[in-house]
Image (spheres, grey):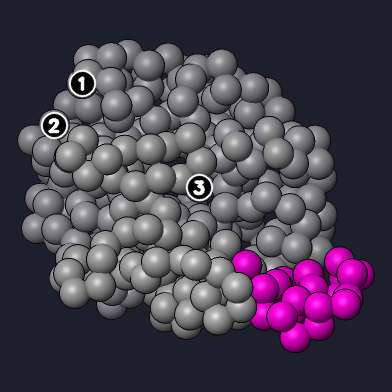
Amino acid sequence: MPLVTTKEMFEKAYNGGYAIGAFNVNNMEIVQGITEAAAELNAPLILQVSKGARAYANHTYLMKLVEAAVIETGLPIALHLDHGNSFELCKSCIDGGFTSVMIDASSKSFEENIALTRQVVEYAHDHGVVVEAELGTLAGIEDEVNVSAEDSSYTRPEDVQEFVERTGCDSLAIAIGTSHGAYKFKPGTDPKLRLDILEEVQTRLPGFPIVLHGSSSVPQEFVKMINENGGNMPGAIGIPEEQLRLAAQKAVCKINIDSDLRLAMTASIRKYFNEHPDHFDPRQYLSPARDAIKAMVKHKIVDVLGCDGKA
């Protein structure tokens, strides 16, 4: 089975009341952990690559890893550019075999966002590729995305219909309370999704797939494991997973997950070296790290996304 776009995936997800996991990948072990979990649960899958990951791992290496995952699993897998920040980057990924790209012009004015998104959409659609755009601005840090809480803003539901009609984008990332990165909300706070905004967006764009970024939940057991094994990571919490599941039962068809994977992998490696300080074979510490990612992805697929058995 070749790589697929998200079009059919999202149609099924919207009608079925579940979401597809979009998991960020950087290396072989991350790709293996994610795809093995999805294969065992027969779940559709989006593997996504940021600009930083593409620079780190090299476009060709990443493409071959994803192609291997398609061969090994037989799953419908879409390859997506996460947070593309220019037409040139989106074009390079489209020309290089990606089946989906995101153009993130959310930091620009409404008209500038429309113009750049439309430019990407026209090129992508001419090449059979789908486009995700963004309205509203999430706080937090992820690769080159760095937005302060003061500069973040919720999506304005009254803007979404005009934006989608004028750009022709295929899905829309909105800001309703999630946050990028592991350093999200301080313990003692009560983070909540603005489901009222989501519901109004759904009313204005019936049947249209919505995307949530910054949806990792910062599992405290991994923060604790990192700190118990030489780390110094401050505690933080994320949006409760039951709220993400509610969003997936509405218009949200794609939920991005990255920080949870990084935490699981890092915690596992730190623990391994604390217990085996003299070991130096990468296979010995990357194997349990891969298993930790696999377990995390299985949990997300079943308990948050609800897409197990939907491939």
Question: Is residue 119 found left or right of 95 in the rendered image?
Answer: left
The location of residue 189, given as percent across then percent down, is 17, 69
> Which residue lies at the image location 42% right of the left edge and 59% below the top edge?
182
Question: Is residue 48 found left or right of 139 in the rendered image?
Answer: right
Q: Main secondary structure of the magenta part?
A: helix
Residue range corresponding to the magenta coloring: 266-291
Q: CA distance from mark 3 to mark 2?
A: 24 Å
Q: Name the secondary structure under disc 1.
A: helix
Amino acid type at circle 3 is Thr
Which label belongs to residue 159?
2
The location of residue 3, given as percent across then percent down, is 68, 47
> Which residue lies at the image location 56% right of the left edge and 40% below the top edge?
50
Q: Name the secondary structure under disc 2.
A: helix
Check if mark 3's residue and mark 2's residue have beta carbons within 8 Å: no
Which label belongs to residue 110?
1
- Among numbered discs 3 and 1, the one appearing first in the sequence: 3
**Which residue in the protein does label 3 denote?**
6
Residue that sits furthest to the bottom in the current view: 275
Question: Is residue 234 found left or right of 63 in the rendered image?
Answer: left
The location of residue 308, given as percent across then percent down, is 51, 76
**Is 29 rendered above or below residue 213?**
below
Amino acid type at circle 1 is Phe
Q: Report the front residue among 234 and 69.
A: 234
Residue 241 visible in the picture: yes
> Which residue lies at the image location 35% right of the left edge and 25% below the top edge?
105
Q: Name the secondary structure under disc 3.
A: loop
Where residue 192 sits, quadrant-wise, is bottom left
